Amino acid sequence: MTRFNRRDFVTFMGGSLALAAVGCAKKAPELEAVSSVKSMGLAPLGNDQLSLMQELKYEILLEWGQPISKNAHFGYNNDYLAILPTSEPDIWWLWINHEYCNPLFVSQYIKGSQKTKEQVAKEMSEVGGSLVKIKRNLKTGRWMFVPSSGKRFDATSKIPFAGGKVAGSDHGIGTMGNCAGGTTPWNTFLTCEENIDGYYGDVNSKGKQIDKPFLQWENFYNYPPQHYGWVVEVNPKTLAAKKLIALGRFAHESCTVHKLSDGRVVAYSGDDKADEHLYKFVSSKANSLEEGELFVANIKKGKWLSLSLEKQPLLQKHFKTQIDVLTFAREASKILGATPLDRPEDIEIHPASGEVFVALTNNVNRMNFHGSIMKLTPKDGDHESEDFKAQDFLVGGEGVGFSCPDNLMFDPKGNLWFTTDMSGKVIGKPPYKSFGNNALFYAPLSGPYAGEVIRVAEGPMDSELTGLCITPDKTGLFLSVQHPGELSKDAAKPTSHWPRGGSEIPRPCVVEIRGKFMEQVLG
Ligand code: FEO
Ligand code: CA
Ligand code: CA
């Protein structure tokens, strides 16, 4: 099996700043702002604050545990954030993923003890997603959550499968591991089930257990592992949710949708595990992700390989049905010679060039500690084409000042923002010593400062900044501060007290960041 070998096709644009020009990014009027920003970027700090570069401020929009309706609270470890318009003027939907929970803080679990059903129930209520309405407070200029507008999806929600039965059932119970996601042109949210093995383990296509659960939920519930690892589509108006079989099952980090001229879509998704793969789905019906063809990437050959059972005799030797292929997409991909990648995480499409950017966070197994952002150029700009060209776009390392890129976002001007995800256990230790805590970076692609990578924000201890989302008025940024204090072993002595300070336990929050810099570069 071939593996992505960057030396085979890397295009560097110079030195440690391996930033390749997108070329068609607009000549941006923000150049003056960028030039003033260069000297304002944060140095790595490594402290227990959400630190922001000069002239930026944050306020908390939503905090773990706060009531969002009469019967629901804001879940733990907020991750992906996305907005969609409501039918009410000036009011927007905000979707928030709750990726996983920390039993130490959530259910007061003591390591090594037997969990009670009540503790498991508490943990089950903390994951999944929240849907709230937000509106701007005209006095303060800040976005506020509309009281009592919240809805929750969690590990107890009954969610049907779209497109058939999985492990004999037409529905699954719960959505967990909700990491990043996407939105569709028909105004629905996509929430991606990423790391699901801890809940009910995982099995291979022969039914053999390949991952053991480790949260003790299986002591009380016995749901099939095949019911998790899907992309879930949520309609905010109806609250209808469905697990999309057609997009395959793996550790979906995100799902990024490109609209074709006839209303069909192409959706890109990465499998965030070392040596796993990058996928593309092409829908066969307009305004739907329920039917179509799934492909997996051979990066070296620049080819999308079809995972259609009908088209692939090699798959016919191993699988009986298309749903089997999709349920065990990792196995099918390896049979076809898909390229193992260095943890493909978030994916974004450049708004002007249409090129596809993929965060490859790292691959310690292969001594790739700092990761990169890879760029795919579809042949003739056609996202349906089975041919593409791949190259490194931006490579992490000490010279460029970041390591382990994870979430990506292009702003309306086509400039790149991204956050990093160094594992909490390695922050501050070699070879990550110089990078401070996980941070938010701005990388303008056009103008004389193209190639600068500017540290805009840095998270508190053990945290990861995720869920980059520009506010509806395009003057600020919503951001998730996820898992502060994650390395704590004793709730009485947490490694972070953010955001409340004092002796408080840490609390994941969604913040809004505003200030002159944001207005200059986004406006
Ligand atoms: Fe949940 Fe791959 O980050
Ligand atoms: Ca992530
Ligand atoms: Ca991550």
Image (cartoon, rainbow, N blue to C red):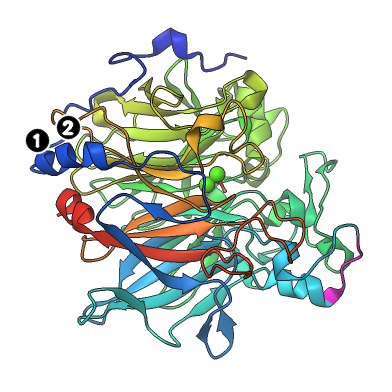
Residue 163 visible in image:
yes
In percent of the image, x 35 and y 63: which residue is there?
Answer: 58
Q: What residue type is labelled 1?
A: Lys
Q: In this view, does 230 lie to the left or right of 208?
A: left
Q: Which amino acid does label 2 sit on?
A: Ser
Crowding around mark 1 (Cα neighbors within 10 Å: few <14, some 14 to 19, many 20+) is: few
Crowding around mark 2 (Cα neighbors within 10 Å: few <14, some 14 to 19, many 20+) is: many
**Where residue 295 sits: x, y (%)?**
49, 34
Vertical arrangement, residue 235 with respect to residue 433, above or below: below
Q: Quadrant of residue 85?
A: bottom left
Q: Nearer the viewer, residue 324 or 271?
A: 271
Residue 268 visible in image:
no
**Where residue 41 sits: x, y (%)?**
30, 41
Vertical arrangement, residue 470 with respect to residue 360, above or below: below
- Label annotation for residue 197: none
The quadrant in which the N terminus is found is: top right
* Disc 1, SS: loop
Q: Mark 1 points at which residue?
A: 27
Vertical arrangement, residue 182 with respect to residue 395, above or below: below
Mark pair 1, 2: CA separation: 6 Å
In percent of the image, x 42 and y 73: which residue is there?
Answer: 236
The residue at the far front in this view is 502
Q: What stretch is highlighted in magenta?
A: 113-117
Q: Residue 46 lies in magenta, yes or no?
A: no
Q: Name the residue under label 2.
A: 446
